[in-house]
Image (cartoon, rainbow, N blue to C red):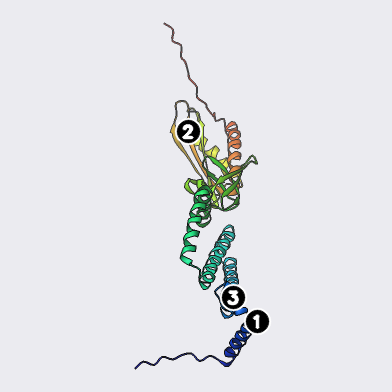
Amino acid sequence: MTVSATPIPSPTTNMLSETFHEVAQSTGLNKFLSNFTGFTWERLIFVAILIGCGLIFIKIIQRLINRVLSRGRIEPSLHSFIRTTANVLLYFLFVLIVASSLNIDVTSLVAVLSVAGLAVSLAVQGSLSNLAGGIQVLAAKPFKVGDFIETNSVSGTVREIGMSHTKLQTVDNKVIYVPNSEIAAAKIINYSAEARRRVDLTVSASYDDKTEDVIRAIRGVIDAHPKALREPEPFVRLSAYGDSCIEYTVRVWCETADYWDLYFDLLEQLRGAFDRSGITMTYPHLNVHMVEK
């Protein structure tokens, strides 16, 4: 024998229900709602309470998302996208729940929205591709605002990482907007990712100059430069025998911000050091010897 327990309504609930029922019956509202909407007064009260609770729940979720984003390490450029996506999903579920409580066929509604979403996605396929690329760039973080990068034959300092384009400022003060879909699929060279960079130079000298003198002159320039790091130790070695000169490879480490200053300073100061040491910086030439018969 199975005994089923039925919930016992509280006196307050019974009183409110009886009051609403009496008011609806006396005013004819109950019959009006039943004829035009198919709902009773009590059902509409339930739907109104459901809508109010749903809106309160959405506000709570939005505050939680804002708190997580403010305390997390997510890229700030993604915050707006995450908030917008969360709002769309929350209100979509809210509409489905309310529609179901109103006896609307939710399956048909979802099908209609799916078809509409497919049509919109096909119409804005390029924009969606850039949006996906922007999310990938912001999530992977191959660069950040302020970095100097090179991608797709363009280079510049990153000024803004948007959801569809990345804004680069070139050294000659031009602004380039690169679609994020191209950046996500391209090779990216980030010159600012590390704290140190290495300056690589190739210097030529005559065959008539002693190797020890050339290396000594190069090391003197490096040691005198305040932006050249002593650790890792600078590298200066003979690297190749050319047709009309001997080549020396020079590698010097420096702080990333000092790269170009050190690069151009070494080029300028090496020539002066060679002139003072009597070292000849050769160039391609051809010696012709006349032989008399």
Decide which of 146, 267 is in the foreground and name it.
146
Look at mark 1 in the image and give the residue it sits on: 27
Residue 291 percent across, percent down from the top left:
43, 10
Residue 17 percent across, percent down from the top left:
58, 86
Decide which of 293, 178 is in the foreground and name it.
178
Q: Can residue 57 be spotted in the picture? A: no
| Residue drawn at the location 65% of the way across and 81% of the way down | 27
Q: Earlier in the sequence, mark 2 or mark 1?
A: 1
Question: Which quarter of the figure is the N terminus placed in?
Answer: bottom left
Residue type, numbered disc 1:
Thr
Residue 33's disc number:
3
Decide which of 145, 123 is in the foreground and name it.
123
| Residue drawn at the location 52% of the way across and 47% of the way down | 126
Residue type, numbered disc 2:
Glu
Residue 288's disc number:
none
Residue 41 percent across, percent down from the top left:
59, 79
